[in-house]
Amino acid sequence: MIRRQKHHRFALLGLLNAVLMASLHAVAQAATEEAPKTELVYEATVEIAETLSLGKGPLGERRMVPITGGRFNGAGLRGKVLPGGADRQLIRADGVRQLDALYEMRTTDGVILTVRNRVLIHELDAERYAFSHVDITAPSGKYEWLNRYVYVGTLTSLKPQRNAVLIKVYRLK
């Protein structure tokens, strides 16, 4: 009986030691992980029409900005932004603008990519904040690699010189 209790005690100590070592390894690994790096995938100049007001809703003022065309260019990736997409916007009570743009781009070799760009914009701090999470959907084939990554972006208005925005899309690495 005493021998069995000793055996159980040693087994329990061994288990606790294994758990502690695994925890320390996980903490050490987390401490050495680097922050994500980015790589520019493409820049797009997106032409837009005048903003349409959709009225005030329970969450704020609603707007829609039609996308009328444009161009994009990156390493091994270039083409046209197709007309027909739109940027739906919500102007919140706190002054923050939430944008949700959905549009298509056609590469120079005829492949259609679908882009959903969700942007948060404000100037509440001393600087302008305009960053986005970008989803890119590509068909199987040459550009299917676009389906495998997380993308972030920036948005800069080109007004008043032209009715367009400059979007830079980066892959997280």
Image (tube, rainbow, N blue to C red):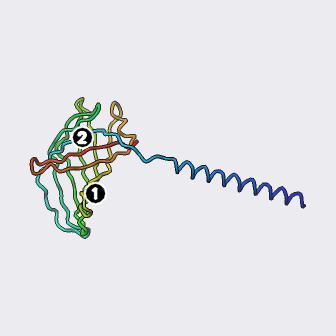
Count every numbered label the image shows and give the total. 2
Is the residue under label 2 in contact with that under label 1 (CB below 8 Å)? no
Q: Is residue 121 above or below residue 140?
A: below
Direction from residue 157 to residue 2 in the image, left or right: right
Secondary element type, mark 1: strand
Q: Residue at x 28, y 45 (%)?
A: 115
Direction from residue 2 to residue 31 in the image, left or right: left
Near-viewer residue (49 or 12): 12
**Which quadrant is home to the C terminus?**
top left
Q: Badge 2: few (under 14), some or many (20 or more) residues near its Cα, within 10 Å? A: many
Give the amino acid type for the residue marked by disc 2 in the picture.
Glu
**Residue holding disc 2:** 43
Residue 98 in the image: x percent, y percent? Answer: 26, 59
- Mark number for residue 150? none
Q: Residue at x 78, y 54 (%)?
A: 11
Give the amino acid type for the residue marked by disc 1 in the picture.
Leu
In the current view of this chain or complex, which residue is farthest to the front? 126
Near-viewer residue (152 or 88): 152
Secondary element type, mark 2: strand
The answer to which image quadrant residue 168 occupies is: top left
**Residue holding disc 1:** 120
The answer to which image quadrant residue 56 occupies is: bottom left
Near-viewer residue (106 or 91): 91
Residue 127 in the image: x percent, y percent? Answer: 25, 58
The answer to which image quadrant residue 170 occupies is: top left
Direction from residue 85 to residue 35 in the image, left or right: right
**Which quadrant is home to the N terminus?**
bottom right
What is the spatial separation of the Cα atoms under label 1 and label 2, in whole angstroms? 18 Å
Q: Badge 1: few (under 14), some or many (20 or more) residues near its Cα, within 10 Å? A: some
Which is nearer the N-term, disc 1 or disc 2? Answer: 2
